[in-house]
Image (cartoon, rainbow, N blue to C red):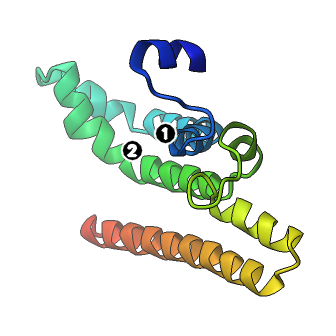
Amino acid sequence: LGQLIYQLTGITIAFSWLATVLAAAVISLPLMYRSARGALSQVDKGMLEAARSLGMTEWRIFWRIHLPNALPGIIAGGLLAFARGLGEFGATAMIAGNIAGRTRTLPLAVYSAVAAGDWDAAGWYVAVIVGICLLVVIGLNVYLYKTKQQQGE
């Protein structure tokens, strides 16, 4: 597949920043898919039927009713996928490598620092990962809290 893309576009995927993005996306996709699917399936079918009975088109129902009601679950799935992608190690190392300044991700930087015996640098990298994840979780909780307040719960 990589060779075909190179022949068609001239873009090399292996050992590039694009490979790190693709590896994280492929590994994280199942979390996002399952969360979004669950959120979309939990939308009240009565609301959807009521909208249909009022003459709304399927696209309008999706954008005005289905998506807004499922949005908290979709956002949660996106954040789970982000956190999973942030911690991705194996696929990134295999596809993108561990090239400092080019394809090295935070988990690979932790691995490299530990392998080199630089425990202080490894600790800082871990602190950055934990800090990012903590900010994401706090942001999600603030969003969900504000959403509940707006809905009057």
Q: Where does the image place residue 147, in percent across and percent down from the top left?
A: 32, 66
First along the sequence among labels 2 and 1: 1
Q: Quadrant of residue 31?
A: top right
- Is 115 on the left-hand or right-hand side of 140? right
Q: Residue at coordinates 44% horizontally, 36% vertically from top-left?
A: 40
User: Are the residues flagged by discs 2 and 1 in contact, CB closer than 8 Å?
Assistant: yes
* Disc number placed over residue 36 in the picture, else none: 1
User: Looking at the image, which is closer to me, 125 or 134?
Assistant: 125
Given the image, on which type of amino acid does mark 1 rest?
Ala
Foreground mark, 2 or 1, reads 1
* Disc number placed over residue 119 in the picture, else none: none
Q: Residue at coordinates 58% horizontally, 54% vertically from top-left?
A: 80
Q: CA distance from mark 2 to mark 1?
A: 8 Å
User: Is 49 above or below relative to 129?
Assistant: above
- Dot 2: what SS? helix
Q: Residues within 10 Å of mark 1 (few under 14, many from 20)?
A: many
Q: Quadrant of residue 70?
A: top left
**Residue occupied by mark 2:** 70
Given the image, on which type of amino acid does mark 2 rest?
Ala
